[in-house]
Image (spheres, helix red, strand yellow):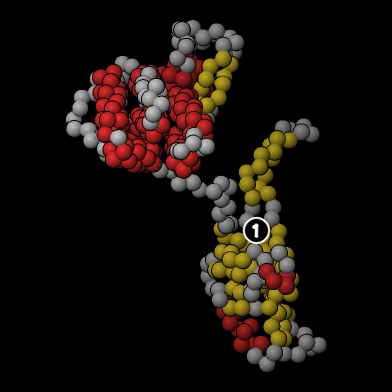
Amino acid sequence: MGWATELQDASFRGVQFECTSTNDAVSKSLAVKQAPYSNEAEIEDVGNNPRNISINAVYAGDDYKTWVDALEAALLETGAGELIHPIYGIMQVNVVDYSVDHNAENVDSCTISIKFIQAKDKKRELFVPVAVLDEIYTEDIIDEPASALEQYLKKLKVLDQNQFFDAVNNVSNGINTFRDGLNLAKTAIENVLAPADFIVGLVDDVSGLVTFDANISALSKWRDLVYRVQRFEKLFQNDKSSPQLQQLWRATQVASTVAITQKVIENVRTELAENKESSLTPIDLAVIRQNNRQQIQAAINTEREQIATELNETAVSQIQVYKETADQLHLQIQELIEIRPPVTKTVITVPCTLHWLAHQLYEDMSRASEILRLNPDLVNPAVLRPGMELTVYAR
């Protein structure tokens, strides 16, 4: 910033004035607690006091009196007004006092000393707001590989009919094997020549298997379904004649895991909106996020190996899609984690029960079940021994 280029024209309530000097004073609001006859004090910083602003304004010229009257009228108005500070810009301030100074040596001019107090400080964003998607659309994950396979099949149909029929049968048999392994009923006829359509339908059918049963932990059900899907990740690995099919199947695996995770995120959001106890702890959500990261990173590593091959263009685009998916998934889960207080550790100092610990930590013994959920390995909640370390929500 330089005075020659960056200073702003000073004004109050729209009345401009020349400014010769400014003085801005800021003080801290401190709560001092001190015991009698003690030289030590406990000082708590409870924020900042309102900013005090002193400005020296000047008017000169034949019409200076007109401007002085206009500024005085603005200063005498009740309530907060808009001040354009020559350095800090727009501020909402209240007038504390002012004085007008005339002297014989300065003809047709006067100076006005004004004291303001800032009514409301500017809101300073500590972090740049990030938009979190309500839902990640799995169609975007499979779009590029599906188009590549579709073009490959069309080209093969013209060049070699026998190889084309072998490829179509291979795709159909593989998809049927996957459906049988997950007990997925076929709801529509799959058109192999339109890979994007039938893969989207397949991923939707997989996400439809997500259920939430109070008798089984949500993390266990999520993990079981994801592992069932991942059992078929090498379904088309032996088909070296069609790298496009292998690429699409990698995308299908990632899309299926993401779709399952989206169902879990939707369920947790609903629970939090209804003020219900969440079926997944922050640690559970972190585990789900880590598993998604690992699978997406494995897919990215494989795509990087394809950059020097005939799939170069599709691989580059697909890597970017995977990166964006991983980032949005991270933000979705992080948002859910931060809704609850941060997770911390506490050490048991005296023999007690889980209800006593909840009362000690939160003055609410009903939160014992919450602590139990955060510590699934706890053997006996009625016997907590000194030295035990438990995971709890911060107070």
> Which quadrant holds residue 77?
bottom right
Q: Residue furthest right?
A: 105
Frontmost residue, 2 versus 324 = 324
Q: Residue 53 is drawn in which quadrant? A: bottom right
Residue matched to label 1: 51
Q: Secondary structure at mark 1?
A: loop
Q: Is residue 321 visible?
A: no
Q: Is residue 49 left or right of residue 198?
A: right
Q: Give residue 148's position: percent from left, percent from top.
A: 37, 40
Q: Is residue 121 above or below residue 20?
A: above
Report x, y in % for residue 129.
50, 48
Query: The disc labelled 1 sits on which kind of residue?
Result: Arg
In this picture, residue 34 sits left or right of residue 67: right
Q: Is residue 102 visible?
A: yes
Instruction: Please name the residue shown 39% across and 34% down the image.
Output: 244
Quadrant into which the N terminus falls = bottom right
Q: Which residue is depicted at the point 55% across and 74% down?
A: 13
Residue at point 58%, 47% (across, down): 126
Could you say which is closer to the camera, residue 172 or residue 32?
172
For disc 1, the neighbor class at 10 Å (few under 14, some 14 to 19, many from 20) is some
- Residue 300 x/y as whole percent: 49, 33
Residue sitting at the far left: 188
